[in-house]
Image (cartoon, rainbow, N blue to C red):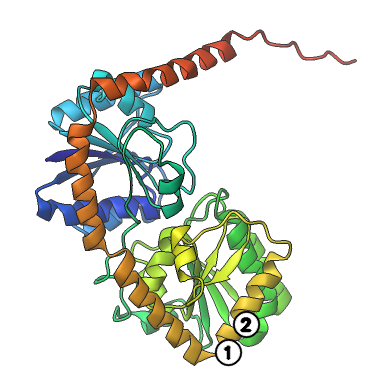
Amino acid sequence: MRVLVILNSLELGGTQINAVDFARTIRGRGIESILVGPRESGGGPSLLDYAAAQVVEVREYDPARGVMAQARQLHRMADELSADLVHVYGMWGAARPAYWGPARFGRRPWAQTVYEMSVTSVVHRNMPLVVGTEYLVEELEHRPGRTILVSPPVDLGADSPEVPGAEAFRAEHDLGEGPLLGIVSRLEPRLKGTALAVAIDSMRLLSATGATLFVVGSGEAEGSLRRLAEAVNDIVGRPAVRMLGALADPRPAYAAADIVLGMGGSAARALAFGRPLIVQGEAGWSCLFDEGTARMLARSSYWSPERPERPVEDLVKIAEPLIADRERRVALGALGRDFAVDRFGLDAMSERMAQFYAHSVDAYGLREWLLDLPREGRRLAERVGRRMRPRVPEEVTT
């Protein structure tokens, strides 16, 4: 089977890394994945660096402007590659072009992966769908198209407590000998920005423990977060927060951390590394992964929309005793590693993805395409209506 996998970005993010890991692993099951994504204009490490290290080819392309133009572009691409299936990652980006292009009239089946924390009405209802959060499967149980859970995978061999490089990472970035709190994340305003700011701000109080927080990653919020880190460092009188930028291989960062703060795929990787984990939500909520919270946190993919009244103080209350108790950190790290082995290993998730592909080829045709056509018609009518709506002239003032 040949699968055209369309990524919505070639930035070094969790979802894109998942796609590369799946492509590498399922080729041993007779599935060839051809990964494509929009050409990156920025510098620094990108998904191309990670993919090259995994010996997975990722092709860049320049998306045409407009849904129909991009639809024709993807249709030609799928034909040239003789793709049996088109797999779109993300709610936005290439979903509608795939519907109107390679999948038009059901001539080629397509499927979609949504690793966001919600599935909005923009997602078509009749093609096969992968989600990464357990509660979404329950919410979408009446959706006509098949919906399955494939957790964002973790390579339990590559991501393990035995990974070397922790001491070298400390030395390279001059992180000292004290306890290290670590974050590996895209630095994006949406979903992540508030949680990252809470973690940085918490170091005003946690600095007294001798701990240092390092942040690995880049993104649109990097500038504002760096300014916040500098302000905190000025207040506490030392570099308690270190912004390290993006790394093509962040494994030494996980290995070096005594405690990891994170959400989603980054949180799952922390568990695989045997590191104690403090899960963060998008609005600054925090929760320790332990014996009592493990299943609840896994069900929500290590994330929450809750809005606490005192997010910084809540995080400090969790982190401070953990920083002081090495034995507790070791115990929680062992718990997390065992949990990772049981719940989201790459081999097991790749087998699920391979089975999903086999089902999807036979599960989508003209009937399913037509069932989504009224929804597309409404969207088109709304867009035309907005364009035809007369403009209200601006009030002239003197």
Q: Is residue 5 above or below residue 287?
A: above
**In percent of the image, x 45 and y 81: which residue is there?**
332
- Bin the neighbour count of mark 2 within 10 Å (Cα to Cα): few under 14, some 14-19, many 20 and up: some
Q: Is residue 149 visible?
A: yes
Q: Is residue 164 above or below residue 122?
A: below
The quarter of the picture where the C terminus appears is top right
In this orientation, which residue lies closer to the viewer: 148 or 26? 148
Q: Is residue 173 above or below residue 303?
A: below
Helix, strand or loop at label 2? It is helix
Mark 2 and mark 1 in contact (Cβ < 8 Å)?
yes
Helix, strand or loop at label 1? It is helix
The quarter of the picture where the N terminus appears is top left
- Bin the neighbour count of mark 1 within 10 Å (Cα to Cα): few under 14, some 14-19, many 20 and up: some
Where on the picture, by quarter, is residue 112? top left
Marks 1/2: CA–CA distance: 7 Å
Instruction: Indicate left or right for 91 with 103 as reference.
Output: right
Residue 369: x %, y % from top left: 30, 22
Residue 22: x %, y % from top left: 24, 53
Residue farthest to the right, as pictured: 398
| Residue 324: numbered disc | 1
Q: Is residue 181 above or below residue 386?
A: below
Amino acid beneath label 1: Ala
In this orientation, which residue lies closer to the viewer: 209 or 315? 315
Residue 72: x %, y % from top left: 28, 20
Instruction: Indicate left or right for 127 with 206 as reference.
Output: left
